[in-house]
Each structure stands twice: as C-alpha cells, then as structure tokens.
Amino acid sequence: MSEILLEVKDLKKYFPVKGGMFSSGKGWVHAVDGISLTVERGETFGLVGESGCGKSSLSRVILGLVKKDSGEVLYKGQEVSTMNRSQRSRMRMVFQNPFASLNPKEKVFDTIAEPYRIAGGYSRQQIQEEVMKLLDLVGLSRGYATRYPHEFSGGQRQRIGIARALAMDPEFIICDEPVSALDVSIQAQILNLLRDIQKDMGLTYVFISHNLGVIKYVSDRIAVMYLGKIVEIAKAPDLYAAPSHPYTQALLSAIPGAAESLNIERVLLKDDIPSPVNPPAGCRFCTRCLYAKENCFREEPVMQQVGDGHYAACHLLGKGAEG
Ligand code: SF4
C-alpha cells in the first residue's frame, strides 16, 4: 500500500499588500486559499498553473519557510511547523533561478557543504567526502569544488543547486520551476538528472512548473492551480486524456494539436489572471470561463470526483463524491 508522506489540509496564506512607505496595508494577497492535497512516497506530484497563481507560495508554506495562516501541513503525520531543524532537513528545495540562488562569493565546495556545517557533528573529512559524492551524483567534476558560481553555465549551476538540495540525505524535495530559466537544450538533461536521482535515492518530489510539457514529462499525478486554489487533480495520463475543468481544458488546448486530439474547443484565455488581492466571488475562474453561468459568480464550486483519483471543482460537473 502506498504511504502518504505529505498531507496538506485546508491550507491558507494571505500576504499583506503595502501601499507605500507611509501607508498602511491595502488588503491581502490570497496566495494560498484553502489548499488540500496528499503526496505519496516515491511519486512526483506536479503542480501547474500560470505565474501568480500561488504555486511558489504554497511550496514555501509547505516547507515552513513562510508561516501559514491556517490549516495543516503534515509530514509523515507531524505538523511541519513543530519540526526541529534536523527533522526539516529531510525536506529540501531546488530553486528556480540557478543564477540567483547561489552565493557568488562562495566556492562550490562551501555552497554544498553549508547544510552539514549548519547541522554540526560532521568532521572536515566527512564533509569533504559527502561533497565529492554529491558532485559525482549530479555529474560535475570534483575539481569544480574550488570554483565560483560565475565560472559555470546555467545548467551546471542548477546541478550545483541540486547537489546542495541533496546534502543531508533528504527524502522529499520541492523542485520550483527548476528548468524554466535554462536553455531548452539543457532542460531535458536536468529533468533526466532529477529523475535518475529520484530513482537512486528513493526521493519524493513536488514539481512546480507553468510548462505543461515539462509537467507531463515528470509527473505521476498533477494538480492544476488557479488563483490560490486547486481546481483539478488527476493522474497525469488522465489529466491529459480527459481534462474536466474548463481552466485545465484551456491550458491544454493551447498546446499545438491538443485541442483536436482531445476533441475540445481551442480556448484562448481572455484577459490576464485577476488580481489575487480581489479574487472573483464564486468560482475563481468565472471572469475568464467560456461556460460561466449566473451561479458561477455567486457560489464557489466544491471538488467532485470525476474518475479514479480524478477530482475537479466546477458547477458543470455532475454531482459526485467530494474529493
Ligand atoms: Fe466555469 Fe462555472 Fe465551472 Fe467555474 S464553475 S469553471 S465559471 S463553468
């Protein structure tokens, strides 16, 4: 039976909007607004949506880097906010921008060694051995340890970021748009590296991307996020074969050739994503949805089961079990 590693229940995080140096708060950004999900050990759980939908905020709240407002984040049954540093070291993150996430003044060795030094209890010899092992694992020459980030290409820098995330033997990693800042030619190499490492180390990933091609390539299950909420969750093949939510359909229909093969209308998403400070009442997608009816502007749809492990939140769907 599969083991649930991460369980998120009705998680909320709002950030205050500041109007300027002399003004007080001007409202709240509804970045994460009642998210519930589970991640099973060993799987890659994809999180997809347009930029500004709250994916990155969600990942930071899950890891305890940002304090939640309400809800629960349980890692192996324990609330993350009550975990000590050593327990949290099993949960790590690969950041989006390898150009910004590395300290330019720090040699590669020190960047990768830092988690061991912070944790304490490791001899110089042990740290040396661990760093060399990690360089091997991510396909970088051991000789690179004495160099600085500016001496590397984007792909090599992301390998350094991955090596650092793998320090201290983690079991759960959030990959936050890990290839979006890289040349297309390099992206597949990094995705394959992440997949190989996952197999070797038995890792569990939450993989965040706005790119549906990347998400499809890496994910076992996928959640589609829109304005702080999850609107659809399904196994990856099911989501691409039979998207249920109009927003998912719109995203997929934008992939060349997909609308025809899915037999759905090609939907051009009109307007930009609304401000998360004043999200629409009712269904969050109502201002851009082709099928919106009057009740969509008043009532928030709840998650309904539409297939095996497949859930979506839309008034158009038949009444089913709540997910
Ligand atoms: Fe569109 Fe209404 Fe469904 Fe929302 S609930 S996705 S507005 S049809």
Image: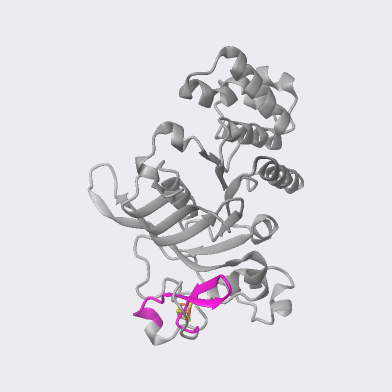
Say whether residue 248 is visible: yes
**From the viewer's perspective, is 135 left or right of 48?**
right
The answer to whether 108 is drawn above or below residue 198 in the figure is above
Q: Residue at left 69%, top 78%?
A: 262
Highlighted range, magenta? 296-317
User: Residue 86's image quarter?
Assistant: top left
Above or below, comparing residue 160 to residue 16 in the picture: above
Q: Quadrant of residue 306?
A: bottom right
Residue 140 point in image, percent of width and height: 73, 29
The percent position of residue 126, horizontal first and vertical second, equals: 60, 17
On screen, residue 146 above or below 48: above
Residue at 54% x, 64% y: name it. 224
Toward the viewer: 144 or 37?
37
Residue 177 in view, yes or no: no
* Residue 145 magenta-highlighted: no
Say whether residue 282 is left or right of residue 59. Answer: left
